[in-house]
Image (tube, grey):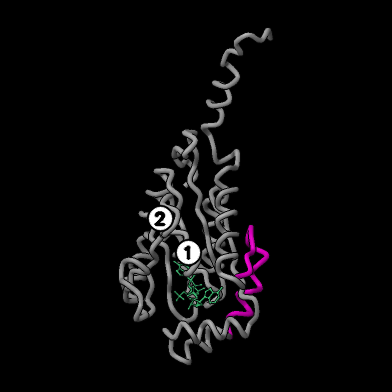
Amino acid sequence: MSDLAGQTSHTGIERRGIMLILSSPSGAGKSTIAHNLLETDNRFSLSVSVTTRQRRPSEIAGRHYHFIKQDEFERLRAGDALLEWAEVHGNLYGTPRDPAETAMREGRDMLFDIDWQGAEQLQAKAKSDIVSVFILPPTMEELRKRLMRRAEDSKDTIEKRLKNARREIERWTDYDYVVVNHDLTQAFTEVQAIVAAERLKRDRRPGLDAFASTLIGQPLDGIDV
Ligand code: ADP
Ligand code: 5GP
């Protein structure tokens, strides 16, 4: 993952893609923010994870997740087909290697909706390409309400996720950025600002070298230098 090819930004200057990781306790709003980002920013593609969990009514197989059985998951893991994997809330989740590596090789930006364990594994593999954002709920009561309102998981599942939330929130210090999702528009604007700034980082813009050299070589008509 380290020798990633560049892509050309709207300025015409070649740049490297970013691997944007969004994590949060369940229900804080990371999937909503990820969805908004994919809708409004066509430079991102989503890394579609494999999971052994049950599909929620609103989810589309192949778009939100690849829903697979445990033996298939274990086959992928044994075959090194997963870039990272973890057990979360009693289910297995993993990032398929091929699509992520292809996107990064082509210099495209990739969005990963994964937990802190996955973030840790990707950081170890491609640190300089990663931008990590942790989304927090404004209060634990609001987190509970959002999980209830989403109404796509059983009562037991919601309780398990709420119980796990405190442990997940403790990982906030591992991330580059923290966004409190009180107001969705505000939180989304903050994530967009993070992306915009990260895309402009010098290290991600190998094309700047040639651009600056060209600038320096341009004549300054009428000025004696
Ligand atoms: P996650 O992916 O973190 O588990 P979701 O994105 O599925 O969470 O959001 C959980 C629920 O909360 C969804 O019903 C979503 O529409 C809602 N939600 C997200 N952000 C906000 C917000 N700022 N205010 C109120 N509800 C929100
Ligand atoms: P959910 O079941 O609500 O879709 O996701 C539960 C948790 O698993 C979330 O924290 C989500 O970010 C995480 N998750 C989803 N896909 C992956 C993955 O491929 N790898 C890891 N490590 N976590 C994932």
The question of residue 168 being in magenta is answered with yes
Task: Give SS at disc 1.
Answer: helix
Q: Which residues are magenta?
A: 163-181
Mark 2 or mark 1: name the one nearer the start of the chain: 1
| Front-most of residues 82 and 194 | 194
Residue at the image point whose x is 55% and y is 41% from the top: 204
Say which quadrant the C terminus sits in. Answer: top right
| Front-most of residues 29 and 86 | 29
Task: Tell me if mark 2 has few (under 14), some (14-19) or many (20+) residues whose alpha carbon lies within 10 angstroms of its own.
Answer: some
Q: Which mark is residue 45?
A: 2
Residue at the image point whose x is 38% and y is 72% from the top: 51
Q: Is residue 25 left or right of residue 5?
A: right
- Name the residue type under label 1: Ala
Q: Which mark is residue 184?
A: none
What secondary structure characterizes most of the magenta part? Answer: helix
Q: Is mark 1 within 8 Å of ligand 1?
A: yes
Task: Tell me if mark 1 has few (under 14), some (14-19) or many (20+) residues whose alpha carbon lies within 10 angstroms of its own.
Answer: many
Q: Residue 80's quadrant in the figure?
A: bottom left
* Residue 19 % position (x, y): 50, 53
**What residue is pinned by disc 1?**
34
